[in-house]
Image (tube, helix red, strand yellow):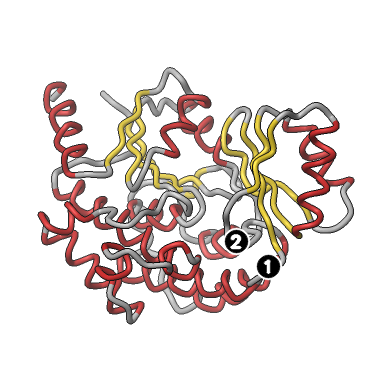
């Protein structure tokens, strides 16, 4: 019997037209788009399906990504595909929490509208993020600690890929120090803020006030927190973890290692592109991974699961 985890990507995977075939073919997906439009006061169809500059601005990226992820999730559930655990990278954690039963679609989308806005407002300029390739984790942590200014690890993505975040000058300085220490590639990322750094702590505090207005339901299945890389099984810790998640590092590699150590052998990435599937090959090469971005992807997955039936 397979042990399946649903995993959901974060910012950076968005593109115009994502999720369109689910929207056109399934009423359940259309319902999610309608809820997102209502809570955001925007046309999701215009934001996601028509070429525009907003799609790459944090405030709009987050609601767009979560809308598509939840639209696909709800169709998969309708088709009878289920998981025993869920996880999401950064904003993807809201989809994971919804898949685990902790948030309604409405409340998840309502929170992500606020989260995107608060993060955009917290640091409109002056921050940066850089991907560090092929470096030892301890070396990156040490150089971040020793560099003047605000710079820290944002993402432990997979072996050989760590992202650093913080003040632009401090991030540049840390990258220079890493190169002098023998690290060959440090790639500045095109992002609109220093995500998962202490510069976003105020956004977390604002989000905490919004979280108090939402009820976290009992979890049907556990999900893995970005902050702790551990299972969340009860609702008590959820709000505090979501507040911290904005400014704390995303421990994605450790999250996948936890799930595979506990017998998860199949990962289904739900959403645009294959970012997490790429990480998975490096973290857990023996695990099976599938990606559902289009209706065709879903139909292929259904065939695979049916033949094992």
Question: Does the image show residue 280?
Answer: yes
| Image: 286 above or below 67 | above
Residue extending farthest to the bottom is 41
Give the residue number, with chain letter if any, for mark 2.
246
* Image position, residue 185 (x, y; %): 69, 33
| Image: 242 above or below 203 | above
Secondary element type, mark 1:
helix
Q: Name the foreground residue: 49 vs 304.
A: 49
Secondary element type, mark 2:
loop
Q: Are marks 1 and 2 in contact (CB under 8 Å)?
A: yes
**Disc 1 crowd, CA 10 A, few/some/many (<14, 14-19, 20+):** some
**Which is more N-terminal, label 2 or label 1?**
1
For image coordinates 10% across by 54% down, the residue present is: 25
Q: CA distance from mark 1 to mark 2?
A: 7 Å
* Image position, residue 116 (x, y; %): 50, 69
Say whether residue 88 is left or right of residue 208: left
For image coordinates 62% across by 62% down, the residue present is: 193
Question: Does the image show residue 218?
Answer: no
| Image: 225 above or below 245 | above
For image coordinates 35% across by 24% down, the residue present is: 288
**Within the image, what quadrant is residue 55 found in?**
bottom left
Quarter of the image with the C terminus is top left
Q: Name the foreground residue: 301 vs 125.
A: 125
Say whether residue 219 is left or right of residue 282: left
* Image position, residue 235 (x, y; %): 46, 59
The numbered dot on residue 201 is: 1
For image coordinates 49% across by 32% down, the residue present is: 279
**Disc 2 crowd, CA 10 A, few/some/many (<14, 14-19, 20+):** many
Quarter of the image with the N terminus is top left
The numbered dot on residue 263 is: none
* Image position, residue 88 (x, y; %): 45, 48
């Amino acid at each position: 019997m397979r042990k399946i985890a649903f995993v959901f990507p974060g910012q950076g995977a968005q593109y115009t037209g994502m999720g369109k075939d689910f929207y056109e073919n399934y009423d359940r997906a259309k319902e999610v788009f309608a809820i997102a439009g209502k809570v955001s006061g925007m046309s999701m169809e215009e934001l996601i399906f028509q070429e525009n500059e907003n799609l790459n601005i944090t405030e709009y990226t987050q609601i767009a990504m979560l809308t598509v992820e939840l639209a696909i999730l709800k169709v998969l559930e309708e088709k009878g595909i289920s998981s025993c655990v869920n996880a999401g990278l950064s904003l993807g954690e809201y989809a994971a929490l919804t898949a685990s039963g902790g948030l309604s679609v409405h409340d998840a989308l309502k929170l992500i509208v606020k989260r995107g806005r608060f993060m955009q407002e917290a640091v409109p300029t002056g921050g940066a993020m850089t991907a560090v390739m092929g470096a030892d984790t301890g070396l990156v942590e040490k150089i971040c600690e020793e560099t003047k200014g605000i710079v820290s690890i944002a993402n432990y993505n997979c072996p050989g890929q760590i992202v650093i975040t913080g003040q632009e000058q401090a991030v540049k300085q840390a990258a220079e120090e890493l190169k002098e220490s023998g690290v060959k590639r440090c790639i500045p990322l095109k992002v609109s803020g220093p995500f998962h750094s202490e510069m976003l702590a105020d956004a977390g505090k604002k989000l905490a006030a919004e979280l108090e207005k939402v009820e976290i339901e009992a979890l049907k299945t556990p999900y893995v927190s970005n902050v702790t890389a551990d299972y969340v099984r009860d609702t008590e810790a959820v709000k505090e973890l979501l507040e911290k998640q904005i400014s704390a590092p995303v421990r994605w590699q450790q999250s996948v290692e936890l799930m595979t150590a506990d017998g998860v052998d199949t990962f289904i990435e739900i959403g645009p592109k294959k970012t997490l599937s790429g990480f998975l090959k490096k973290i857990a090469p023996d695990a099976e991974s599938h990606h559902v971005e289009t209706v065709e992807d879903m139909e292929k997955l259904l065939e695979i699961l049916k033949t094992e039936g």
